[in-house]
Image (cartoon, grey):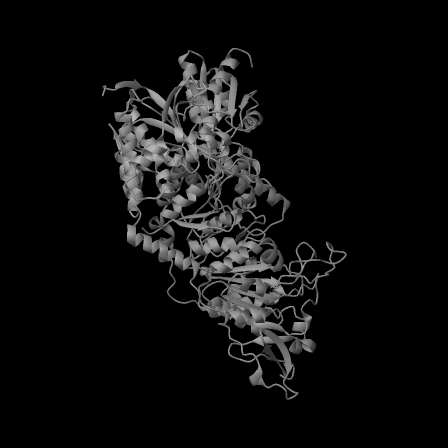
Amino acid sequence: MSTLVDEILRSTIVTEAAKYSSKDFQSDQDVRWCPGCGDYSILAQTQRVMPDLGIPRHKMVFVSGIGCSSRFPYYMNTYGFHGIHGRATVIASGLKMARPDLSVWVVTGDGDGMSIGGNHFIHLLRRNLDINVLLFNNQIYGLTKGQYSPTSEVGKITKSTPYGSLDYPFNPASLALGSSATFVARSLDRDPKQMQSIIKRAAEHKGTSFVEIYQNCNVFNDGAFFQFTEKETKDDSVVFLEHGKPLVFGKEKDKGIRLNGFSPEAVSLKDGKYSVSDLLVHNEKDTTLSFILADMTYKPHLPRPVGIFLAIDRPVYEQEMERQISFAKEKRGEGDMTRLLSSGDTWVVQ
Amino acid sequence: MAEKRVENLDEVTIRFAGDSGDGMQLTGTQFTNTTAILGNDLSTLPDYPAEIRAPAGTLFGVSGFQIHFGSTEINTPGDQCDVLVAMNAAALKVNLGSLIDGGTIIVNTDGFNEKNLRLSGYSQSPLHDGSLDKYRMHEVDISKLTALALQDLNISSKLVDRSKNFFALGMMYWIYNRPLETTIEWIKSKFKDKPDILEANLRVLKAGWNFGETTEIFSVRYEVGPAKLAPGRYRNITGNQALAWGLMAAAKKAKLDLFLGSYPITPASDVLHELSFYKSYGVKTFQAEDEIAGICSALGASFGGALGVTTTSGPGVALKSEAIGLAVMVELPLIICNIQRGGPSTGLPTKTEQADLLQAVYGRNGEAPVPVIAAATPSDCFDAAFEAARIALKYMTPVMLLSDGYLGNGSEPWLIPDFNKLPDMSPEFRTNPEGFFPYSRDEATLARPWAIPGTPGLEHRIGGLEKEHITGNVSYDPENHEKMVHLRAEKIERIADDIPLATVEGDPDGDLLVVGWGGTYGAIKSAVARQRQKGHPVSHLHLRYLNPMPKNLGEILYKFKRVLVPEINLGQLIKILRSKYLVPAIGFNRVRGLPFKSIEIEKEIEEILKGKK
């Protein structure tokens, strides 16, 4: 039996693929982030990528939790659901299970996704629903005015940690990989082109795609990522991961990453000791390698890896769910309530 | 062999009791199904420990199953039992208090060895010290007779021991003149892949029957004729099964997919189990990572156009509260089923209680009104679930559906409804972009439009921040907030125009009205009926709708001199009644994790009528 939802979807099918521009994805709401916030760039890149996806706007849903990042859905001219703190991933999961036809996006932050929503985050990844998660990591609580977050560095002085924070930070990429994610990437708010390409890849990935985006909070944690985003330092501090390519970095492309046993080390390509052929070649299908690369994150003597750590295929949860339902219908026939109510042991009173 | 005497009984209550590994729940369920098919009215009470397999022979490991059946109307599982089947000494000790004076005890003598006696704190065997003289005792070495019946089968002694409950069952079938066929069929289908267990159980069941037939131990057989139930086709059903089926029926009648987001919790898990089975009905079940994920996934599914449901018990509702508030704010249909258990905190997971009413009606931050509906009997869980869905869909609101451990696990015969005659309740999804605003409202119901993602031109954003009237944009405007608070409250209040008026069982006025809600229905009904037979001016009113309440409730309350409110809590409905209607109601409150005995309510009624309270 078809449901009302099936009927609506049938009756409203748009046969011609709409030609969108980024403007079509801008809602009529005033954007209310602080001037200079990294969120503006992420919003702009997302709106720029959306027209290229070939997905009708009305088939897209942005779901968020609570925090600065979570205002995102209000600014997207798609369907949107601004949920409660930490729960965007589960609201999105229920929506995707009910409606596998939709393109579902989760926008979250380091507080929303890693702290209060940490449990849901890891379970979403292991289930591998086809949902795209954008985590804006600014290493601070912005909306509550500047407490340390689960990704803040140890010793962070904030209003709630006047003597410095004691917690060791999560590395979101490692946490995602440890949760059996099938797509894990990292991007930077000040690198629009790279971010666009990653968001596009995330959208195309079948299964949960997780994108951590380093985002500058210029009010409460200004400059947290400047080392990786500013001209003077970024080339020597960031290594871009490209599938099938050796890990080369440095302003002069004169440095690289090689594996010493299981440990990555930064080497010079200038002193004649090592050449490009000695370097680690990235393979985004290699789960073991992805752990090694993600683990470079907080190592002070290594550049920060940015790009796609892992992109592999695994059965997609909601598709498996649909498959079970089809299988049950095939085996048992379409459910019939009248038959069910009178099934098993019954008796008649005259 | 002398012809055995047959006595006719109007009703009888039997309690099966043994170790939690003895299969007493299975024995009770089988006896129940057979009894239902014979046309008796009945009510059951499973009573089992929270531990899965508590150490054998201990007092806290005793599992019991009580069935009250008869040729008359049966409303409760029985205040006390007439017959106690005790598989060991601990089972006897724990349950003796619920046996009537002069009642019958059937014991498995093998369960009274030295170790059993020690574990249950008997210094000497109660079977022979005269302490049970006031009861009719039947001593049967069930373990040994079971072993004898199986001696030529090559099966393990563990398996032999596990079959002994079927001996007790066969014996009870003989005593109460019940056919074996239903159980034989069940054994054949259940163990079709395990031929040795199948054979063993069949043999032992028949051995138990034959034991009754051939030995002189039981001189009397009992006949309990069919009850005069309304004509139609019946089945036996537990509350949790009825609730699951009610939700499924509602989804079909709404032409929506049913989506259940749930986290396992006693005593609600059976609803999850039941619904998980019906994939061919398009039911999607999701065992979430926690209670919050359960409700949030259901709400996400509702946003997508499914009938979203979450099932839980009290502690789970506590965790879901914030998301219920979100559902109030985004005004999407959602059903939250609370199969209440003893609290607070982890409390008594396998025991029943009614102490979550105030949580259901008020337990959220902010002004967050939620309709609350309570089921009255196990089979009524079907109708209550169906009604909860109707209200959720029509008014675009979360609805709290209250059941409890007693209703969920208890069972009774159910006149199977004609599915085709159940009302259609398909919602109207908004499709026209012309003049669409997410928070415009239906004039009659105040419900906002349900515009599902995938509909062209209706792209919009919802969320937990306060919404501007009509447009649904985020708004911090003071006047708008006050307006929205009132609108949300009024939307729920208006449901009172759309639910049946409260009805009184008994005279419409008089000295005393007993007002109850939820699973106390049967106990109150029996108590009031007996009091009325004695000529006392008592009536009964049972509330299905706890929020909003029926419009005529106040009017009815004022027609009685006194109002008595029995509840399995410290007085929660009574607080609401007092505050809403300013009636000086009297509470009768017990919180033992058990359903009321109708006799205790009856005593309370008598004392009030005599002016002692």
Q: Position of residue A136 (x, y in %)?
A: 60, 63
In the image: residue A118, left or right of residue B522: right
Res B169 → quadrant: top left
Marker count (numbered): 0
Residue drawn at 39 percent across, 27 percent down:
B107
Residue A275 lies left or right of residue B137; in this view the side is right
- Which is nearer the eye, B216 or B73? B216
Looking at the image, residue A193 sits to the left or right of residue B261; the answer is right
Quadrant hosting residue A14:
bottom left
Tell me: residue A8, above or below residue B96.
below
User: In the visual, does B461 lie left or right of B215?
Assistant: right
Which image quarter holds the N terminus of chain B?
A: top left
Farthest residue in the bottom direction?
A272
Q: Position of residue B432 (x, y in %)?
A: 42, 53
Nearest to the observer: residue A2 or residue A181: A181
Does residue A309 appear in the picture of this structure? no
Question: To which quarter of the image does residue B175 belong?
Answer: top left
